[in-house]
Image (tube, helix red, strand yellow):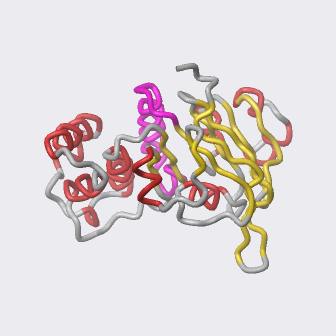
Amino acid sequence: MSRTQTMLSLHNVTLHRGLTRVLDDVSLDVHRGELVALIGANGAGKTTVLRTISGLLSPGKGSITFEGRAIQSAAPDEIVRMGIAHCPEERKIWPQMSVEEHLELGAFVRRNGEDVRVDIGRVFDTFPVLRERRDQLAGTLSGGQQQMLAIGRALMSRPRLMLFDEPSLGLAPIMVETIGRMIARIREQGTTVLLVEQNASLALRLADRAYVLETGRVTLSGPAKELVAHPEVHRAYLGG
């Protein structure tokens, strides 16, 4: 299918937390095969956008469609079954579960146990360090290894769209580059990606297109290469 085909669309999505408008008429599109970045300062509403797409939050206004189907009222497990996986901020690892148990949990929507075992093997091929630690408790892994596990767990649902929320958060620079390469590889293997990332340099280097979110509103959007050169983006997010 053409990359210009819209896979995910948010149209005028508004969400309140109490009296505070957290998202204010947010509209964005992700086309099939793209890697789209959503950048902005801490507290801009980026995580809220992903949680709303995933069904963890309900918008007060606006629509969200995935492959032409309205999903703004769907339950989170239904959204996973449709083909959207969410790799959350701060990884959300269960410390007392093993690496392999996390991967099995990621496949909760699937029925064919043999296929699940094959996909666990693929995750281990992608992240060999996880194979070495398959029986290890996740709470004993390093931060980078936990991020790999969170990505592997999300991949176990065989998503067509992956939502990444701050995958570089708290990681050493060398691990940030490793995770960036993994996200690029996931996209190259055919999974569409929406990436939320406070590290704007990393996000814009990986992305085809990007949106800038400020206090719950989209203020800029366009090809990532153009936004890198935009004076406002450079000043606010790239240290220029």
Q: Nearer the viewer, residue 101 or 8?
A: 8
Please tell me whether residue 176 is drawn above or below residue 228 in the rendered image.
Answer: below
Figure check: 58 above or below 132: below
Is residue 238 at least partly visible in the picture? no
- Give the left or right position of residue 159, taking residue 193 as reference: left
Residue 146, horizontal then vertical, whole percent = 34, 56
Q: Looking at the picture, how far across and down is residue 115, in whole percent?
A: 19, 39
Relative to 149, 202 lies left or right: right
204 relative to 20 in the view: left or right: left
Residue in the picture at 65% in, 35% down: 204
x and y percentages locating residue 80 in the rendered image: 42, 51
Q: Check the image and report above or below for 19 versus 143.
A: below
Q: Which residues are magenta?
A: 166-192
Determine the residue located farthest toward the bottom in the rendered image.
18
* Residue drawn at 79 percent across, 30 percent down: 229
Which quarter of the figure has residue 189?
top left
The one of 51 and 150 positioned closer to us in this rendering: 51
Instruction: Tell me what residue is drawn at x 44 percent, y 41 percent.
Output: 179
- The answer to whether one can see residue 109 in this image is yes
Q: Residue at x 50, y 50 (%)?
A: 168
